[in-house]
Amino acid sequence: MKKSFIALLAALMLAPALRADRGMWLPALIGTRIKDMRSKGFRLSAEDIYSVNKASLKDAVVLFNGGCTGELVSGEGLLLTNHHCGYGAIQSHSSVRHDYLTDGFWAMNRSEELPNPGLYVSFLVRMEDVTAQVLDGVRDDLPEARRDSLIRFNAARVADAAVRGTDCRADVEPFFYGNQYFLFVYRNYTDVRLVAAPPSSIGKFGGDTDNWMWPRHTGDFSLFRIYAGPDNAPADYSKDNVPFRPRRSLAISMRGLREGDFTFIYGFPGQTQQYVLSDAVDYLLNRGNPHKIALRTMRLDIMSEEQAKDADTRIRYASKHASVANAWKKWQGESRGLERLGTLGKKREQESRFDRWAASHPQYTGLLGWMKALYAELEPYAFARDYYNEAYRAVELSRFASAVRRMPVSKRAAAARAFYKDYSPSIDRRIAERMLGQYLENVPQEFRPEAFVRTVDSLGGVREFVDDLFGNSLFTAPERFERMTAGDSATAQAAIEADPAVRLADAFDAVYRDRIFGRYRDLSASIASLYRTYMRGLMEMEPDAVFYPDANLTLRVSYGRMEGYKPLDGVYYTPQTTLEGIMEKDDPTVYDYNIPQRLRDLYASKDYGRWAVDGTVPVAFLATNHTTGGNSGSPVLNGRGELVGLNFDRTWESTMSDIEFDPSKCRNIAVDIRYVLFLIDKVGGAGYLLDEMDIR
């Protein structure tokens, strides 16, 4: 890369704040934003946010289990995150006898805290711009494959050198489509124990109905504790481990926020695509999202019908239902938001300006035409890929059978126990019939497995095929599985290979591997390499603009203010909800709105303790912070760096913010920390936990 462009890139990221109320900023560069942040109400320094040489707020924030954010709220390793982030751990400890999903879980002392094998948290130790090292020897005229190989080699060398002789791990991540690279050094802790979780009727209050919506009244939190060895170093689970002592934990503010008050979020946002072309938006709006939404609607309808029949099925499919519903509702809001903002038209207008500008800049002439041709070629493969993931892979039976076939014999029994614990063949059978039928109906013939199509035809239809599959597969029940795997390993493997669920997986996986994925990958890589050039051109065309990097699950800061919004003409949503709103929604006949009797009793007696504000308890609030998936569990901090809330969602109108963020319309949703403390104290009876927190 030319040195002149590296200088331009640095200048653009360090440019004076322009529309800086949007963006996800790298903490190591937050000094460039401090003046703007302070003008909006921030009272600390850049070094208070991020420092390598002293404890800073970054040391109180963790990547939780590789996909959420958590924060330390005591000097004894107590960690706060969302209920939905801890949901899998809560479910893993739940049974009909100990139904922690329904009843909640409150450890009354540390001996009752529950270990969670496989759960981990990652602390960021430091980040560093390593663009020059990663791009060493990379020339503009290198073939793309050679370029990628050299970058991977350089990045691996940088990462290895950064952690050699330590207990840390390192990643090198690209920014601006590979125009810039940063090194991230992490330290992982793997002994993370469940401390507390409210009943799902609080932690998931409103369920799928309220998901992505406002007003919101969800107590979306759970508490864990990080344990370490006696030297405070990472250690696998042991009863001899001790609570982790963090460099920094967050103070908690009881003062709350008023509309207009400064807020900032520290967390690990997963993915945004702020700079994609109109072609990508067009596919999402007019083909991708409509089909994915329709497929998930069918699955959710089947799950809901079956879950309503008995408590055991409800528990076993609770996490699966929530997982399917989350993206389903997001896609609907995303499409609606992009249409309301006119994002497709804006993208096309920007591309027209770029084409006009590129006419006098030869290195960019024709670039967009080339990219658009590749997008047109990519579309059928993207569509087939969507159906492979959303239709075929919705069939649990074939996914599990395929996984067992490949795993070591020693791991099969444990995998089977985990699978059958939360599996219903009757639900899977219904889903398989719908999804496989949709695949045949909507996917072009070239992407349909021939063996599957022949069998469906010979049996008389998809229903008959599914009846045959579930009637003959030995993977449909644990007893069948045990018989199949009870003999010698060669006999068991032969039975697995011959099973119809494995043959179904083979048929679809072969089509995906040989006809879909390879071409999709190659075309996507070609487009991505051109985005690198397009991004460079955008920056040169608009030298006065502020460019912030897309999210990529690295630590970021976003800032804004507490503020309501106007979703429709004549409608204004205030930014704070209270306990009164919960009681207005409370309905014992509706699962999603049936709160625990304990909460009703507290409301009736107005027994709010020190958590009362103006005769009620604050529950949730809105702010204008730019967030996305991965920010779940992120701390929402006030201008003094004190914890005031826990981010858990965006409004439905905001889900388009992964592609276009508009601070006049986009709002993140946080549970008020005062409601969290009230629930711990008054509902859970675990007030002893508050004694180790710094509550101000």
Image (cartoon, grey):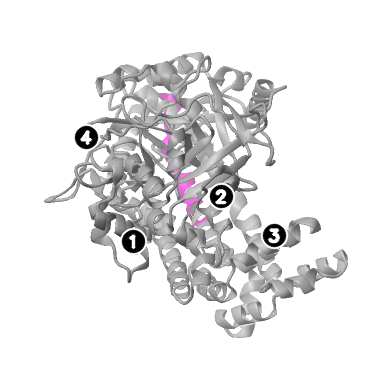
Dot 4 or dot 3: first in sequence order is 4
Range of residues picked out in magenta:
361-381
Residue 150's disc number = none
Question: Where is residue 532 drawn, in percent x and y?
Answer: 49, 31
Q: Identify the element where label 2 is drawn.
A: helix
Tell me what residue is drawn at x 54 percent, y 34 percent.
77
- The amino acid type, in three-letter code, at marker 3 is Ala
- The amino acid type, in three-letter code, at marker 1 is Thr
Observer-side mark, 3 or 2, equals 3
- The amino acid type, in three-letter code, at marker 4 is Arg
As for residue 368 lying within the magenta part, the answer is yes
Residue 209's disc number = 1
- Report the residue marked by disc 2: 520
Closest to the observer: 506 or 688? 688
- The amino acid type, in three-letter code, at marker 2 is Tyr
Residue 258's disc number = 4
Q: How many C-alpha atoms fall within 10 Å of the one at disc 4: few (<14), some, or many (≥20)?
A: few
In the displayed structure, does residue 213 sit left or right of residue 402? left
